């Protein structure tokens, strides 16, 4: 996931920061047995999602991938899977011979 820069945008950071404050507010008021304060914290959590979504819509989020990029990624994963399968088959074929030799 490190190669995709997932979540490294101003929209993501802002939305998550606001939501964390909302969780803190809701948690404090839950322990204090104050339902009104708890629901205010839940509202702040939802506000974080709305602000993050609005910032993404304003262009501060991760841009959508082009079709060419998606196609190149799928080709690369198929090639990686194809090269990994023969090694797995060789390992599986070698295991019964090793098990018989040790018996």
Image: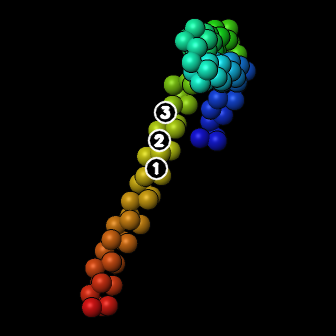
**Residue 17 in the image: above or below residue 70:** above
Q: Quadrant location of the C terminus? A: bottom left
The label on residue 79 is 1
Q: Residues within 10 Å of mark 3 (few under 14, many from 20)?
A: few
- In the image, taking residue 102 as reference, residue 42 lies left or right, namely right
x then y, percent, for residue 60: 70, 16
Q: Secondary structure at mark 1?
A: helix
Q: Quadrant of residue 91?
A: bottom left
Is 32 in front, or is 92? 32
CA distance for labels 2 and 1: 6 Å
Residue at 62% of width from left, 32% of height from top? 6
**Residue 43 in the image: above or below residue 65:** above
The label on residue 71 is 3
Residue at 47% of width from left, 41% of height from top? 75
The label on residue 75 is 2
Closer to the chain start, of discs 1 and 3, is 3
Is 71 in front, or is 56? 56
The label on residue 89 is none
Q: Is residue 29 visible?
A: yes
x then y, percent, for residue 9: 70, 24
Q: Residues within 10 Å of mark 2 (few under 14, many from 20)?
A: few
Whether the residues at callouts 2 and 1 have beta carbons within 8 Å, the answer is: yes
Whether the residues at callouts 2 and 3 have beta carbons within 8 Å, the answer is: yes
């Amino acid at each position: 996931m490190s190669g995709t820069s997932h979540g490294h945008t101003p929209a993501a950071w802002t939305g998550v920061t606001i939501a964390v404050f909302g969780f803190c507010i809701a948690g404090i008021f839950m322990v204090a047995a104050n339902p009104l304060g708890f629901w205010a914290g839940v509202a702040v959590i939802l506000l974080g999602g709305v602000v993050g979504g609005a910032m993404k819509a304003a262009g501060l989020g991760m841009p959508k991938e082009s079709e060419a990029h998606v196609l190149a990624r799928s080709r690369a994963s198929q090639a990686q899977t194809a090269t990994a399968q023969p090694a797995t088959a060789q390992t599986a074929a070698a295991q019964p011979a090793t098990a018989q030799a040790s018996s």
